[in-house]
Amino acid sequence: MKCVDAVVQIEKDVLPNGPQIGIIMLGGLAGRIDQTVHTMSQLHKLRVTRHVTYVVTEESIAWALDTVSH
């Protein structure tokens, strides 16, 4: 979340009226289950404030969908 906070600060300082920067998190979906659950929790929380947020590993990609028809 420190990196996400840094991105938000850059958007405020450098791009005050510009678009949001997309976030791609590398890793975090494999290995220890507590780390995977934390990554998915953060992804779920970010879906409210961020338009483009993905988690990418060598084997998969994840993103959270809003509660609409897909």
Image (cartoon, grey):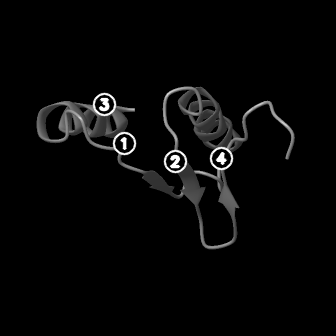
Label 2 neighbourhood size at 10 Å, few (<14), some (14-19), many (20+)?
Answer: some
Above-or-below relation of 23 to 15? below
Instruction: Looking at the image, tell me whether mark 3 or mark 4 is earlier in sequence order.
Output: 3
Disc number at residue 5? 3
Mark whose residue sits in front, 3 or 2: 2
Above-or-below relation of 60 to 63? below
Return the x and y of residue 10 as percentages of the image width and height: 19, 39
- Mark 3–mark 1 contact, CB under 8 Å? no
* Amino acid on which the number 2 mark rests in the picture: Val
Mark whose residue sits in front, 1 or 4: 1
* Amino acid on which the number 4 mark rests in the picture: Arg
Instruction: Looking at the image, tell me whether mark 2 or mark 1 is earlier in sequence order.
Output: 1
What distance separates the C-alpha of mark 2 from that of mark 1? 8 Å
Task: From the image, tell me which residue sits under label 1.
Answer: 20
Task: From the image, tell me which residue sits under label 4.
Answer: 32
Q: What kind of element bears circle 2?
A: loop
Return the x and y of residue 57 as percentages of the image width and height: 59, 65
